[in-house]
Amino acid sequence: MQISVLGLQDERFQRPLQLIANLFFEESEVYLHAQQNVDVQITIDLEIGSSIRVNALLLDKEEIEKSAFYETLVIASESEKEQFKQIKYAVSHVYLKVLQEWTGITQKWGILTGIRPTKLLHRHMQKKTPKAVAHQQLKEDYLITDEKIHLMQQIVDRQLAVVPDLYELQNEVSIYIGIPFCPTKCAYCTFPAYAINGRQGSVDSFLGGLHYEMRRVGEWLKENKIKITTVYYGGGTPTSITAEEMDMLYEEMYTSFPDVDKIREITVEAGRPDTITPEKLEVLKKWKIDRISVNPQSYIQETLKAIGRHHTVEETIEKFHLARQMGMNNINMDLIIGLPGEGVPEFTHTLNETEKLMPESLTVHTLSFKRASEMTKNKEKYKVADRGEIEKMMEMAEKWTKEHNYTPYYLYRQKNILGNLENVGYSLPNQDSIYNIMIMEEQQTIIGLGCGAASKFVDPLTGKITHFANPKDPKTYNESFEKYTEDKLKILSELFATNQSHA
């Protein structure tokens, strides 16, 4: 689909208009100038005074015309960037409206193409805006439907019940520890994850660097009397390393980090069932870690083979029971809607199998075509369901979780997500992942340790976010972990020193 947008000179409009076009069309190109033989031309007429007035007129090849109008008051802003943001939202508004008119497709998330929609509602809650007013504003400003606003409210309410002091945790941190190894690489994956076979040298060097990071960051936290809210071992697959290596890693955590017994939650992803062994579960138990993930993704063997997961469906079930028998009392499972070759019948089977296990929490992902993944590079090889069937499967997941007493507690969205839907975490009462809430709502600093781990520094006073990433490949990480650790500690010292001087 080729779209020519006339009337906008500023190149900064290119990206938001492209992202919105992608919500409607699988392959789209947006031009900010006149172009021969495009499928559709949209003329934007923009007036800025005390209000921003935007008209959009759409004309397609068949000379069908559609139009839309939007007006909003200008809010005084300190920077040109903030001022442009207001104009960008107004333009996005009419652009989305006119495309909805033309295609007949309603975008339930409106103009939102970002990852964390619930943050918008949290802002209103922090300001104590009445719910009805907040909902109306989300609807008017972003064109979000009532259905999605209701989902957002349900999630925000649940988060505040699980973490009542969510808005007061700026002076604590959470920690993400990245283990960049997996048994094999999945076709949809873009995480820093390397097949572990034949890499023992890399693993040893990497673990040496990770231990160093943990010690130095632990020292800094103790010196500055900063508490840890949650710790999350992700990756890759943190259970790819040996039981002995895991044992040493958790011992390092208990030695280095302050008040580990007071940390609200420690999670270890054991997502690949083929990495779970009795010895590794014994290690988790020894260090009082009982929250893990065992991820089926699908209960269809052909699908697992197609996406490069080398475990069997039976292995997922066996390892789940083994973990349960060995005292893991808070198990999460991930399911993915829209995997290649799967539709309603296959997803019905997956839900029926999940019902036999009843994990404490369930994360339902909608497949996203991530730019660097094997699946995106070979789309013709991986045929996926259409928008209507994807939506139907998401509705099935919503209905199934409700019937089985699961409540949605966190949500995030991704670019190029099938059906422009979302990923939702559901849990049984009191089994929610606090780390998932912290990472999504960005209320506190999360320090990333390990290869490919991203840190997110949240200024305790202003809420301004600074991103910092460790190298993604083990070789570069092994050569430079000391420098990256010191760089992180410098940022932390500046952030928390400023805050303590205001305390």
Image (cartoon, rainbow, N blue to C red):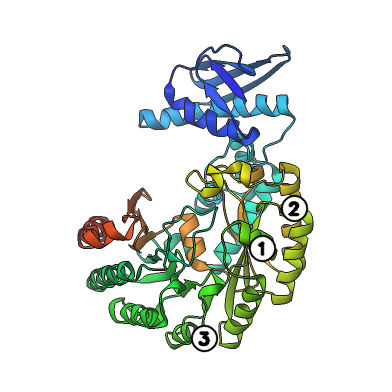
| Disc 1 residue type (three-letter) | Ser
- Residue that badge 1 annotates: 298
- Residue that badge 3 annotates: 278
481 up-or-down from 104: above or below? below
- Residue that badge 2 annotates: 343
| Disc 2 residue type (three-letter) | Gly
Q: Please indicate whether residue 359 sits to the left or right of residue 437 in the image.
A: right
Q: CA distance from mark 1 to mark 2?
A: 11 Å
Q: Position of residue 367 (x, y in %)?
A: 61, 51
Within-10-Å neighbours for mark 1: few <14, some 14–19, many 20+:
many
Q: Position of residue 227 (x, y in %)?
A: 34, 71
Within-10-Å neighbours for mark 3: few <14, some 14–19, many 20+:
few
Q: Secondary structure at mark 2?
A: loop
Q: Quadrant of the C terminus?
A: bottom left
310 up-or-down from 122: above or below? below
Q: Quadrant of the N terminus?
A: top right
